Amino acid sequence: MSQPVVIIGGGIVGLSAAHELLRRGRQVVLLERGDAAHDSCSLGNAGMIVPSHFVPLAAPGMVAMGLRWMLDGESPFWIRPRLDLKLASWGLKFWKASTHKHVDRCAPVLRDLNLRSRELYLRHRAELPQSFDFADVGLLMLCQTQAALEHEIAFAAKSTEMGVPAEVLTVEELRRRDPGIDYAVKGGVLMKRDAHFDPRKLVQLLTQDILNRGGKIIWNAEVTGWRSEGRRLVAAVSTQGEFSGSEFVLAAGAWSPDAAGQLGLRMPMQAGKGYSMRVTQPVQLSKFCSILTEARVAVTPMGSSLLVGGTMEIAGNDMTVNPARVRGIVKSFCRYYPAFKEKDFEALPVWAGLRPCPPDGMPYLGRTAAKDNLVVATGHSMMGLSLGPVTGEIVAQIICQEPLSVKLDNVHPDRYA
Ligand SMILES: Cc1cc2nc3c(=O)[nH]c(=O)nc-3n(C[C@H](O)[C@H](O)[C@H](O)COP(=O)(O)OP(=O)(O)OC[C@H]3O[C@@H](n4cnc5c(N)ncnc54)[C@H](O)[C@@H]3O)c2cc1C
């Protein structure tokens, strides 16, 4: 009997890879260091599918904006100051990548990956046995200042030109489309190809789907090393023993560089911590998900509840919650949605997740020179949920030697080697 594909990591990327390989008749063993009820970045995020987000995180103006935000304790961005060579090198690479040329090269790739992923989410909606509250209604970019609105209007034109249609909405039009919701904004842009859903429900359904298709998931199996023969990996060494395979997929999110480093694969990455809170009985429930552009806060209706999240803290793989940043998210949200009060959030648990962030804002996806039978699938930063299904598809296409559904550029895992 042929050996299975061994996947490391049970977040959206690992699960999507398992799903796609099983669809193609391959055997799969997924190793997840958490238990069946474990948390991951793929659970408490804002649940947005974002073809409109084709500009990578490393873009002109980001470094200057980041430095300004560093001075404000409640702002959406913060780097914990520390003497760390890896952090300094990551920052330098980010700064070098933040050019128009980089954006022009990466934008079509991110667009196409996101659009293909959207199709795969539509397939999930049709095939999975239960709803995951998928709503194909678009995403609102909401603006409180004229400057932000003008910026979004200009971006809407570019987005439409690139095949991702966007519509500018006045406040009156916004209220007509979403009756009963108080918006304290100057206007907004509707990104019509974007969508949203409840990631907790989707992850649960995908996990069950993998088991139903005969895939194996080994919980509490933290991969701590590898066994190799020459240029090939033979087994992943884990806290539950060794798992042999014909192919291996590294999809361990923000922790991927630890496992990759043992193979000599250099993949610069910082964890970008974010927070979210779920209001279970919101006073108002918009039908749209939204991004509050000046505040960088994400708001998503999920069934009858409302998720509010944001912040990017570069502070290592530390999960501690910073109350000032959480306060910043809540204050901003209440400014844009004035029917809500800060006290609505007082007793709510705060979820934290670590986004896997390469310095150039592009995923690490594909085979590597480190080992012949290893595929890397990580580093999706702010859009790992959106890009999960297409990443899984590409992993399966690489392993099964099929043509790729999206033309890839600037995602090679060895680009910093
Ligand atoms: C506040 C917030 C809002 C967000 N909103 C959105 C959004 O709206 N849309 C979007 O597209 N993205 C969003 N994101 C980003 C998205 O959540 C991430 O990009 C995505 O979840 C990353 O998925 P992953 O599978 O790569 O990693 P993870 O979900 O972190 O999964 C990695 C898994 O690997 C396991 N693991 C790690 N090391 C090992 C090991 N050695 N052995 C075995 N297992 C291991 C971990 O336990 C974990 O379960 C958001 C993130 C945050 C924080």
Image (tube, rainbow, N blue to C red):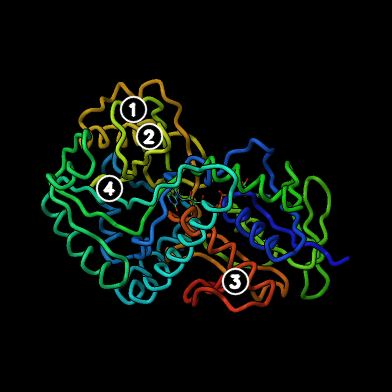
| Front tag of 4 and 3 | 3
Q: Residue 36: horizontal and vertical position, in percent?
A: 68, 38
Residue designated by label 1: 282
* Local secondary structure at mark 3: strand
Residue designated by label 3: 366
**Which numbered disc, 2 or 3, marks the residue that appears first in the sequence?**
2
Q: Which mark is residue 16?
A: none
| Front tag of 1 and 4 | 1
Q: What residue is rendered at 76% in x and 52% in y?
A: 214
**Which numbered disc, 1 or 4, marks the residue that appears first in the sequence?**
4
Pick whichever, 257 or 303, lies toward us: 303
* Local secondary structure at mark 2: strand
Pick whichever, 75 or 310, lies toward us: 310
* Local secondary structure at mark 1: loop
- Mark 2 vs mark 4, CA separation in Å: 26 Å
Residue 23, image quadrant: bottom right
Q: Residue 393: horizontal and vertical position, in percent?
A: 59, 65
User: Is 229 situated above or below 275?
Assistant: below
**Which numbered disc, 1 or 2, marks the residue that appears first in the sequence?**
1
Residue designated by label 2: 306
